[in-house]
Image (spheres, rainbow, N blue to C red):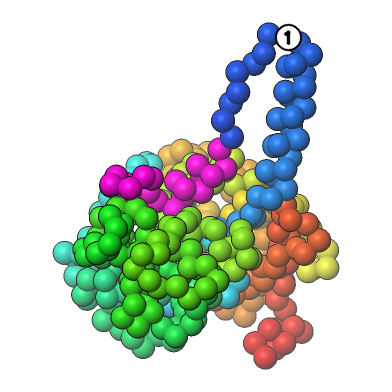
Amino acid sequence: MGKGKKKRRTDFEAETADNTVENEAEPINGGESRSKEKKNKTHKDKCQSTEIPTVTVAVPGSIIRNAQSLELATRLAGQIARAATIFRIDEIVVFDSKSTSGDDPTVAIPDASDENETGAPFLIRILRYLETPQYLRKSLFPKHNSLKFVGMLPPLDAPHHLRKHEWGPYREGVTLKERAPSSGGTLVDVGLNKDNVVIDQVLEPGIRVTVAMGTNRNLDADFSHKVVSSSKPREEVGTYWGYKVRYASNISSVFKECPFKGGYDHLIGTSEHGLTVKSSELTIPPFRHLLIAFGGLAGLEESIEEDHSLKGKNVREIFGSYLNTCPNQGSRTIRTELSSYLFNISKNQSTGRYRDLNIPVMDHHNVAKFYA
């Protein structure tokens, strides 16, 4: 974006644009065409080898309605946020069980006027609030009844939640109304005491951005910093940079509206009716974009039955792996926020293309070790 242009760009749009390779005109000469194809194939393989693998978790918004009070609902959402951060989840999809697909802007962007929201809007608001660095919350989240008890939750302390005295190569910030005095850029509050930085773009106030700070602590008004994609810290220095939150009207929309290029290449469903296997025998294929779906009180089966797009399909036809991660459970149901802790996501150090998934299947022999 050039100076003097006002443009709002989402992080996922930036990621998509970065991964897009422009098509070149096909030459008439056959030899040149084969050479071009070989060159494009080499370039494609290079792009794939550097592509960052992602893990997405899908949870039903209906789990909030099972909480007996606003405080308990807040704690439930906090547990999901903490599990997502611990296991470096890239995206959380909160889905409803509507019969037809379709975006509902009042849910995708929670309505600040609804002080008694529940379900998906409530869960989305809490998840986004907790993922946001503390110094940005006052600017990005107006006072709301749903946030009444968030102060009781322990901080996620994610890598991008930097303290005011810490200097890092990247920081999250929010654009301000004030303009830089010596340039046409925009001032950004990045949480460094009262020191704001200047970016070389003109953006509307109140927009969250990721700013490349550099290695030198240079806060001079004449020095302009760059706004980068939120995926940049992970791509460049391998630092986990929080999760995105997305709304889906039903389970099929979770798959169809995937923001990643090529969609999810492996789907995992969890259920007490799923396949029971030993951890040592469980094999998950390598992936670029993995989705792990958790069901509500009635499980994923009910979500699929209520979705007209998936009418008549068996749950095992939809998911590449349908697993029971806690066989021989002592309770009739396992709460979704607890189930999220039964997955141990780890980056496979032997390859840059894929992540591997290690799922500890819980039984009475290793459950004590899990909670130790």
Q: Tell me the quadrant of the picture where the C terminus can be found.
A: bottom right
Residue extending furthest toward the right: 280
Question: Would residue 344 be counted in the magenta stretch?
Answer: no
For the point 68% across and 8% down, the residue is: 28
Q: Is residue 248 left or right of residue 181?
A: right
Q: Position of residue 285 (x, y in %)?
A: 75, 52
Q: Residues within 10 Å of mark 1 (few under 14, many from 20)?
A: few
Q: Position of residue 114 (x, y in %)?
A: 19, 65
Up/down of 237 relative to 32, above or below: below
Up/down of 39 relative to 5, above or below: above
Instruction: Choose top left, top right, bottom left or bottom right for residue 209.
Output: bottom left
Foreground: 15 or 117?
A: 15
For the point 57% across and 68% down, the residue is: 240
Q: Position of residue 115 (x, y in %)?
A: 19, 70
Kind of residue at badge 1: Asn
Question: Would residue 9 be counted in the magenta stretch?
Answer: yes
Foreground: 144 or 134?
A: 134
Q: Tell me the quadrant of the picture where the N terminus can be found.
A: top left
Residue hosting label 1: 29
Q: Which residues are magenta?
A: 1-20
For the point 47% across and 79% down, the residue is: 162
Up/down of 21 relative to 160, above or below: above
Residue 270 at least partly seen: no
Foreground: 121 or 325?
A: 121
Q: Position of residue 107 (x, y in %)?
A: 30, 56
